[in-house]
Image: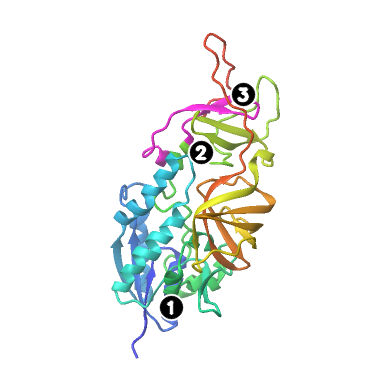
Amino acid sequence: MAKQRVVVGLSGGVDSAVSAWLLKQQGFEVVGLFMKNWEADDDDEYCSSNVDFVDAAAVADVIGIELEHVNFAAEYRDRVFAEFLREYRAGRTPNPDVLCNAEIKFKAFLDHALRLGAGSIATGHYARVRRAADGRWQLLKGLDAGKDQSYFLHRLNQDQLARTRFPVGELKKSEVRRLAAEIGLPNARKKDSTGICFIGERPFREFLNRWLSHEPGPIVDERGREVGRHVGLSFYTLGQRQGLGIGGVAEGGGTHAPWYVVHKDLAANVLHVVQGHEHPWLLSDWLRAEDASWIAGAPPADGALLGAKTRYRQADARCRYEAAEGGFGLQFEAPQWAVTPGQSAVLYDGEVCLGGGVIAAAAQPPVVPWRPPVAGRRARRPVATAR
């Protein structure tokens, strides 16, 4: 009887490498596939694509499997990067990794693997797949709570899950590292990738500056005072603390607590900030989401009590689900910090990921409108200028 073929996405990292080895140990015919999703500056110092391919090839050689190199850069540019730029221009903060999984890794990659005769695909994500008693496929959190990546996979559907394997989802990261060392994989100690796939480890503002137009403007505190200058609203996100270039508070006193972005007024080109991590303007007890996607093919019951994440690595927040056409609302039992439009609100029933949507709105802070100084009147001196 012929072995079932599984095509594994080999990224050059340790998680996908151990996934390929585990599948081969389980008796599958394993084929590695390296995806090139970005090529605009693959000779740049921050782009690791070439190094990653060399690492993936070395892993395939040690495990004893074939490796194919496939270029999805055009699909990535059209389906992911274009949407990424649209969202930033609209003043939101998108999560391209969510869209990349839905459009590239589990669509373009899956289609290509099926053309290669694969029965399923596999990746190194920390998540699990299970078939429920009703026959539907479920996406579960990875057993390593600190590495669970189900948040990024919440837009997958039944057809995709039915053909997907997550071999390291049953393991802790420490076990994966230990296995890699025992096997003798050349990337056993390779540092985990933390950057967005097309940005890598480069300074984020430097990257966006190449693609987005920007207009400097005032940074205004909760009393309507100009306390600095921003370099363009697209470069900031709600809850941001670093890179504001604001010192203390002058002319009127105040504390020297850290500043946080609380609101972006696109119409007036004003960035609003407050001081203190627990400032009430940073907290929201509700949100509205759109562009919903449900793993089971249907939304939860209206009024259901569920857990939700509004950002990766956040603990599940208890909330009430409210059905709405094209999306949903969430009412939280405890206010959530810096709920950010453009990010994903992902819902859970225990360890089962149900799906989610894109945050469209949350509680708005009662910001004081900023008015430019009247001509001929001496303007208040800004506290600091953004560096």
Give whichever of 47, 61 is nearer the camera: 47
Question: The residue tagged with tag 2: helix, strand or loop?
Answer: loop
Q: Is residue 112 left or right of residue 191?
A: left
Q: Quadrant of residue 373?
A: top right
**Measured from the top left, where is residue 261 in percent x and y?**
58, 37
- 2 or 1: mark nearer the eye: 2
> Residue at position x 33%, y 71% from top?
113
Residue receiving disc 1: 23
**Measured from the top left, where is residue 303 in percent x and y?**
64, 60
Question: The residue tagged with tag 1: helix, strand or loop?
Answer: helix
The amino acid type, in three-letter code, at marker 1 is Leu
Residue receiving disc 3: 225
Q: Real-space Cα distance between discs 2 and 3?
A: 19 Å
Q: Which mark is residue 236?
A: 2
**Measured from the top left, where is residue 361 in percent x and y?**
56, 45
Residue at the top extreme, as displayed = 376
The amino acid type, in three-letter code, at marker 2 is Tyr
Image position of 124 with respect to 133: above or below: above
Looking at the image, is mark 2 or mark 1 earlier in the sequence?
Answer: 1
Residue 22 falls within the magenta-colored stretch: no
> Residue at position x 56%, y 62% from top?
147
Q: Real-space Cα distance between discs 1 and 3?
A: 60 Å
How many other residues sit within 10 Å of disc 3, few (<14), some (14-19) or many (≥20)?
Answer: many
Residue at the bottom extreme, as displayed = 1
Q: Is residue 203 visible?
A: no
Looking at the image, is mark 2 or mark 3 earlier in the sequence?
Answer: 3
Magenta part of the chain = 206-233
The amino acid type, in three-letter code, at marker 3 is Arg
Image position of 263 with respect to 3: above or below: above
Give whichever of 38, 342 is nearer the camera: 342
Q: Is residue 351 left or right of residue 39?
A: right
Say whether marks 1 and 3 touch (CB < 8 Å): no
